[in-house]
Image (cartoon, rainbow, N blue to C red):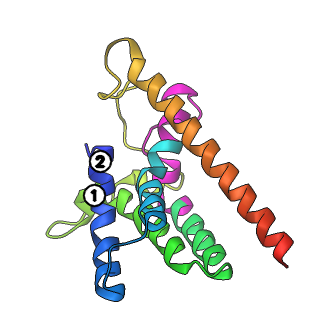
Amino acid sequence: MVLPSEHFIIALLPVAGYALLRDRHLPSLQLVAVTFFGSQFPDLIDKPLAYELHLIPSGRVFMHSLPFAIPLSIAVVAYAARTNRTRLGAAFAFAHLSHLVADNQRILPPDPYVSSDLLWPLQPPVVRPEVPQWVGEGAVNLHLWTGFSVLVLALVAYVLAADLQTQLDFR
């Protein structure tokens, strides 16, 4: 299991390295924030949908799945390019996709194996316990994660709505 902080580090190191090499300075706070959000995004969506609302079969399908992650990444990069923020869009897409690689480390050499989770709903998900190991007794961790997810997603939705309004007013 990869921890949230590890997902962030895995995503941030290449993004920061790119910024250092290309711009000769550390990445902006905005780039770090977008990278952080992208690195957590699949879990912010999938864990509450699976374990709190029981709408999907596992906490590692839907936004953890390439049939959903790739079109979303393309849409984010396209919007970012249209609004002259390609680097931010690319950072989100990279961070999101790096999350999938980190959760499915077996797709890397020397013995690559693609989990059926990555291809859900085209393939059935990997069978997992109904209650994940990180929840613990009494499920307080699940409720805290769901609350955190709702807060972060609401904040991002507000920022996105304000940005869309600005973009529409600008044209």
Stretch of the chain drawn in magenta: 46-68
Direction bottom: furthest residue: 22
> Where's the N terminus, which quadrant?
top left
Q: Residue 133 in the image: x percent, y percent? A: 29, 27
Q: Which mark is residue 9?
A: 1
Q: Residue at x 66, y 74 (%)?
A: 79
Q: Is residue 83 above or below residue 72?
A: below
Mark 2 lies on a secondary structure that is helix
Labelled pair 1, 2 in contact (Cβ < 8 Å): yes
Q: Residues within 10 Å of mark 1 (few under 14, many from 20)?
A: some
Foreground residue, 166 or 86?
Answer: 166
Compute the Cα span from label 1 to label 2. 6 Å
Kind of residue at disc 1: Ile
Foreground residue, 41 or 19?
Answer: 19
In the image, residue 56 lies in the stretch drawn in magenta: yes
Q: Residue 135 in the image: x percent, y percent? A: 35, 24
Q: Which mark is residue 36?
A: none
Q: Is residue 167 above or below residue 6?
A: below
